Image (spheres, rainbow, N blue to C red):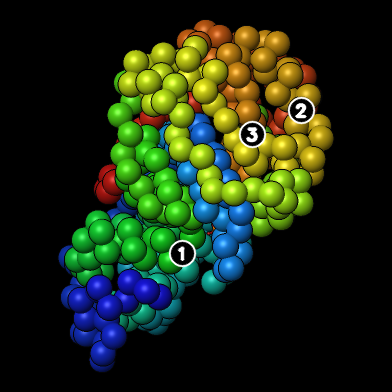
Amino acid sequence: MSSLHAVPGAGGAPRPPRSGSSTQVRVEAPGKVNLFLSVGAPAADGYHPLTTVFQAVRLIETVTARRQAADLHGAITLTLEEPYAGVPTNAANLAVRAATLLAQTTGVGDGVDLLLRKRVPAAGGMAGGSADAAAALLACNALWGTGLSQAELAGLAAELGADVPFPLVGATAVGHGRGDRLTPLMARGTYHWVFATSAQGLSTPAVFRRFDELVPGATAPADVPAALTAALRDGDPFSLADALHNDLQAAALDLRPQLADIIAAAESAGALRAIVSGSGPTIAALAPDPAAAMRVANALTASGLVAQALRVDAPVAGARVVG
Ligand code: C5P
């Protein structure tokens, strides 16, 4: 809870709630793909130092924060707009944890019901749960009138998880530390992705553990390659494809060997490159244009290897209030 002292009203007696005036606030936040992910040896706390390049993609989570009925005063609850396998609706949900952390930090006791509409695959390596948490922070900050700044929200986001700060800023950014220390990166143009999802998720800690077994001599993470920065600056998907890299790919393929078949199918259908997204198992295939993306998506769907093939463009903006 290192950022507590930075938040006004925290640390002493809870300050009285300063409620906002609306009855509900709707926020959208994007999922992500890692264009580059270099992993170092784990630190004493078990976390791995990273250099990563995030790109926010047009798979959008929507969180609507609604005032609680008076008889539920103070409770933080979550409702899924549609059933979604693998997403808890209790206190373990990252959006609930985010609202709870904001309430504890600011001393607000209003409670909230969070209505969640999911579009990012669960446990897929695309930070869908992190987007939900980022959206919940922004929505509750507006609903409750707690007035935390972007920097203060980013501090709370980093406490919730390494991937939570990025969906607050979106677009394209370099992540250092655990992936939570962000610097914006210039990117021109629009990139056309196909995301191949799997029916079964992969556990991020399990993938990092397998990385440690496969690469026992890992040192410090590498810098972002100049070729990748240049490709993004030029808006050139061909050069970007050559520069894509994920240190966790070998570990994810080791745990889920059939992902190699999806990569091969995407590339033979016209993807410039296909890689594991984050810790997987989603495969991210970069296409040169929308028509090629359509062909890749159709081929992956017909292959029977994937749960879904989602055509998505990127980059997109970070979390924002939409209603
Ligand atoms: O921070 P978050 O809860 O999203 O991380 C999930 C897990 O992924 C951690 O518990 C850790 O096992 C692993 N992780 C890591 N190094 C990072 C980020 C995540 O080892 N930089």
Vertical relation: 292 (above or below) 121: above
Disc 1 secondary structure class = helix
Q: Quadrant of residue 317?
A: top left
Q: Can you name the residue that lies furthest to the bottom here?
A: 13
What residue lies at 74% left-to-right and 19% top-to-bottom? Answer: 264
Say which residue appears at 41% left-offset and 61% top-offset.
158
Q: Which residue is mark 3?
A: 276
Give the mark nearest the N terminus, 3 or 2: 2
Q: Is residue 11 left or right of residue 46?
A: left
Residue 103 placement, left or right of 22: right
Q: Mark 3: which amino acid?
A: Val
Q: Where, by quadrant of the figure, is residue 4 drawn?
A: bottom left
Measured as percent of width and height from the top left, residue 92 is found at 57, 68
> What number is the disc on residue 160?
1
- The residue where tag 2 is placed is 260
Helix, strand or loop for disc 3: strand
The quarter of the rendering in which ligand 1 is drawn is bottom right
Mark 2 and ligand 1: say if the CB distance to the nearest ligand atom is below 8 Å. Answer: no
In the rendering, at what x and y percent does residue 9 appear?
A: 22, 81
User: Going by the image, does 267 lie left or right of 188?
Assistant: right
* C-beta proximity under 8 Å, tags 3 and 2: no
